[in-house]
Image (spheres, grey):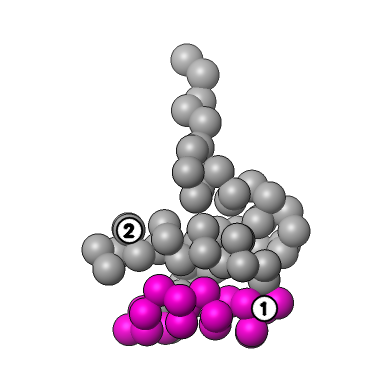
Amino acid sequence: MAEKKATGPASYFPSIEKKYGKPIEYWMKELKKVSKRAHMEQVAHLKEKFEMGHGHANAIVHVFRQKNGL
């Protein structure tokens, strides 16, 4: 059986891991540190602290918030 291809924001994960050299789980743990902040504040955190592009940061934050019921 073929592996299901990621869609939506998670479809960015392979390119995020390649570009920034860290697994997605690293970014999820980083977002736990700022989990009380609003969505765009979390995006800004990734952009400012790690020089991550807006689209990549937004995709990670979207999935993080969805998985954590935020």
For disc 1, the marked residue is 50
For disc 2, the marked residue is 66
Amino acid type at circle 2 is Gln
Amino acid type at circle 1 is Phe
> Which structural element holds mark 2?
helix
Q: Residue at x 51, y 58 (%)?
A: 59
Position of residue 34 relative to residue 29, above or below, is below
Q: Residue at x 25, y 63 (%)?
A: 69
Residues 60 and 32: in front is 60
Position of residue 14 relative to residue 38, above or below, is above
Please state if 62 lies on the left or on the right of 69 as rendered: right
Is tag 1's residue or tag 2's residue first in the polypeptide sequence? 1
The segment highlighted magenta reads: 34-51
**Mark identifier at residue 61:** none
Q: Residue at x 52, y 64 (%)?
A: 58
At which x and y percent is residue 68? 29, 64
| Number of numbered discs overlaid on the protein picture | 2
